[in-house]
Structures are given as structure tokens and as C-alpha cells.
Image (cartoon, coloured by chain):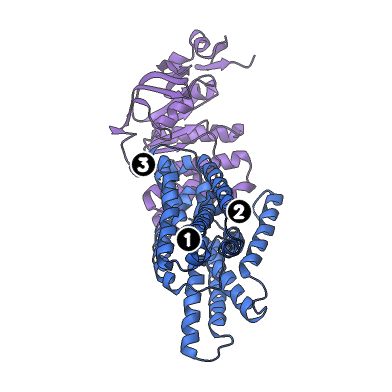
Amino acid sequence: MAEARPVPDRAAWRLAALAALALLCVAAFMSIGLRGNLLFVLELRAMRLASLIEVAVAVALATVLFQTVTANRILTPSIMGLDSLYLLCQTVLVFVFGGFGFANLDARLKFGGEIALMVGFSLALFMPMLRSRIDVMLLLLTGVVLGLLFRSLSSLLARMIDPNDFALLQGASFADFNTVRADLVAAGGVVIGVGALLAWRYRHVLDVMGLAPDTAVGLGVSWSRAAAAALLLVASLVAVSTALVGPIYLFGLLVVAIAERIVDTRRHAVLLPAAILVAVVTLVGGQTVFQHVVKGQSALSVVIEFAGGLLFLLMLLNGRRP
Amino acid sequence: MIEIERVSLQLQGAQILHDISLTLPKGGVTALVGPNGAGKSSLLSLIARLSPLQTGSIRIDGMPVDATPGSVLARRIAILRQDNAVASRLRVAELVGFGRFPHSRGRLDAKERALVAEAIARFDLTDLADRYLDTLSGGQRQRALVAMAYCQGTDYLMLDEPLNNLDMRYGRELMGTLRRLADGDGRSILIVLHDINHAAAYADRIVAMRCGRVVAVGTAAEIIDADLLERVFGFRMRVESIGGRRVVLHHR
């Protein structure tokens, strides 16, 4: 908060460098290996770029907010069980409609339904917290247990479906950054844009929330209401990003830890843009490398989750900040 | 003025506070004393709306604490709790700056920054201003937290055992600072104290509590009495008069 100090200046420089790097990645993504019908290729790439940036923004914001509310830096929002709910949802759809029916579902309807289901689930989970002061940790544990339940239900259903359908389902249960969902990009963009604006508007309140619940109340922040609102925003962001590309587990942890290392502060005015920029660099830059250097030999999501997992272990072993 | 009317508190079946009614006039230093488990911190939490009120009412300058918006109260009362697990990756100056949040909503202009600098200087933190909290000793961190509560600039300042972790010099300095805040700036200080001698030396008013009830309210001369203290703390201690001041010899 003390903005008169030289330290935030250093953070500002690092932020600017990150922004330049992100722009570089975007430029590379758009321009490397252009061939054929330029207009068509550029339009296609712009669409994919938009969806990648949307996912980057959603995951980065969701993870920062989630870590602030839970006062825990090795958590990611996937602990709330939203991804298991998404998986269950896919399994039920395949189970009911079969592989062919699943592939031919109206994408927009499915997208809207999934988001509504996930946000509704989070509302049901957080509503009690609005009314009385329930411990956030208890809430998270409830999320973990329900997530387990959803997961077991999906594996039960998965045993009963046709092997071909199962292969299809398997594809749907990993994040896929290659498929373009042009029809969903606009709808997702609205939700994520509003979420980003809200987070930015309340960045100072988020700083206060990061202190501790009692301290925040003492400084005039209504903790239970603010925490519930923040968690609801997290749920909406995770829901949109999951519906766009599929479940992501450790990507958020990875980018927020890297961003915090770079700017060396938890102040949201700096950390939020930093985390978003790191996420954009990782996703857009990574996708460019995978398309043109590795030539699609492997999946970016797998590599990111692998790196995130390694980092998670490191953070656990260190027992403190990375 | 803080008006507490018929306040009781139950936590998981245990009765913490029994039907407390108490009026504390504005101004001066009020000390809450009593043995462990007397309900001092619970009462302070209720007054500062950190815990929800179950029965009864508490009004600060006529504002009911359970119905007044938290942001309004934050400009009237500041509270420092006993156990403060504050995020450690913060600099001292940043932490103290958070005290201005109720007024600035996070935007620190020159005037606000001057107030932060004044608080840092007043609590002898100038040399530590750029240090991270997790590099400080317990006493230094405690001083930074008190500076943040002070920086909130409220009429009422409530501190739960602020002498924790402070050495004799800083303990004495803190009590002296609080005394000056009450005398010079007209602030009302409400403070939970363990050391009865600190209460006797600095407080205008002492509220003695035991088992969730208020046993006695009065000036140091009225409260520092061997019989009364035995009723509050449950053992006999010697009370002497040294240079006209009452001193309790409770050590042995």
C-alpha cells in the first residue's frame, strides 16, 4: 500500500517486462509459419488466441483470489470439486446420449448448462457461509468430499459405458488447448471480462482480506460477505475455463507462484496483472512452441500439469513460499 | 461512550459471558483485568464486532455494533487482537498503511502517507519500515501491529494484551503512548492487561472480571485492594503503597 517506496517501482518495471514478453508470445503465435489463405488463417488463429487468453485470465484470477481468501499459497480452486462435477457431467452425458449423441450435442447449450451447473453447485456450497460465519476450511473440506463423491460416481458410470464412448470421455477429461470453440469464445469473454473488472475494482479490499479475517473486519471489510463473493467469482471463472478447454489442476498454482516470485509482492494491484501475464506467456508461448517446434508431438496441458506438480512438491518440501 | 446491556455469550454450550451490563464513558484509559478465562477477550471481541452478538446490545456513541455497517465502525473503533496471524510477506510500512484503509479505501495520497509516517515514527519503527514482517522479532511485530491500529485514527482504540512480547522498555513506552493519546488527543483506550501493576499505574478505570461476570469497576485506588483482588484472582497477594502509588506484590 505504501506506494511512495521504490519497491513498487521495481515491480512496475518487471510488470512492463512481463507485458512485453506476453506481447512477443502473442505476436509469435499469430505470425509464425503463416501459409495459404492469410485471412482465414489469421481469423482462426485470432479465435484460438482469444480462447487461450480467456483461459489464462480466468485461471490466474481464480487462483489468486482463491489463495487470498483461504490464506494458503499451495491451494488451487480445483480443490472445490468443480472439475469433478464437470467430469461427472460429461460422463452422465455420454452415458445418456452415447458417444455419437455426445459429440453432436449443441455446444452452446452444453456450455451454458455446464456453467449453470457449476455455479449453482458453488452457490449451494457457499450460501450457508453468507448466513452464518462458517470456517472457510470447513467449506473447502466439504468441497473435497463432494468432489470425491462426483469422481467415484463418474468412474462407476464410466465402467458401464461402451469402450468406444469411454475413449471419447477420456478425451474430454483432459484440458485441450488445440480445439477451437469459436462459438463459445464470445460468451466466455463476457463472463471473464466482468470477473476481471470486479477483481480489479476490489483489489484494495482483496489486499485487506489477505491480512486475516479478524483484521479485515477491524478495517471495515465484511469478511463473510466479501469471502463468499470472492469464492463465487472464483467458481464462475473456473466454470467458464473448464467448460472452454476442460479441467485444469495445477496450472494456476504454477503461474501464481512464478508471478509472485517475479514481482515479490502479494498486493493485488501488482499480483493480479502479473499472474495474468505469466499465464498468457505460458499458454500462448507454450502453444506456439508445441505447434511449430515440437510439431504437436505432445500436449501442452500435460506438460503444464507436470511442471505444476513438480512445483507443488517443491513448495510442500520447502514448507514455505517458493 | 460504550454502552453494554445484558450481554451474554455461549460458545458450544459453555457460558462465556453472563448477563453483562456496563457503561464506559468516553475518554481515558480503561483496563480490563481478570484471570485467564474471565471473558475479557470475548467481551472485547463483541464490542469490536469481531464476534456476532448473541443476546443483549452494545452501542458505541449510540451506534449499535451489530447493525452499523462495518466500514462506518472502522472509522470509530480500531481493534488489535491477541493472536494476529498476519500475512508475513508484508513490509512494516505496508502493514501500518493498511490502518488507513477505512479512510482511504486503499488510495494513499500525500496526507495519508504523512499520517502513516507519523505512526511509524511514533512507535519507533522508522528503521524497520522497509523490513518484511517475517524478519522481525515478536516484540517488533507487536509494535508494528499496534502502530497499524493507532494509524486507523479512531476515537476508540481497543487492544487485547498489547504488552505481549514487549520488553520492559517498550511495554512502558507503549503504556506511556496510550496515556498521551488519551490525555492529548482525547482518544478512548480500552485495553486488556495481565499485569495488574500496569493497570494500576496507567488506567483511569479498571474493570475486574471473573468467570464471565464483572466483579468490580472503579479507579485504581478502589480496585487495588487485597480483598477485592483475592476475589477476582483467587489468591492472596500483598498490596503496598510506595511513594503514594499502590503496588501489588503478586510474585511470591
N-terminal label among 1 and 2: 1
Q: Which residue is mark 2?
A: A159
Q: Amino acid at mark 3?
A: Gly
Kindly identify the residue that appears in the image at 57 percent across and 82 percent down. A28
- Give B116 or A120, whichever is nearer the viewer: A120
Q: Position of residue A158 (x, y in %)?
A: 58, 55
Horizontal and vertical percent position of residue B241: 53, 13
Farthest residue to the left: give it.
Answer: B62
Disc 1 to disc 2, C-alpha distance: 16 Å
**Residue A128, labelled with which disc?**
none
Q: Which residue is mark 1?
A: A97
Q: Is A302 left, or right, of B45 in this rendering?
A: right
User: Which SS class for mark 1?
Assistant: helix
Instruction: Please state which amino acid type lies under the numbered disc 1.
Output: Phe
Q: Are marks 1 and 2 on the same chain?
A: yes
Q: Which residue is mark 3?
A: B70
Q: CA distance from mark 1 to mark 3?
A: 52 Å
Q: Which chain is blue?
A: A
- In the image, the chain rendered in purple is B
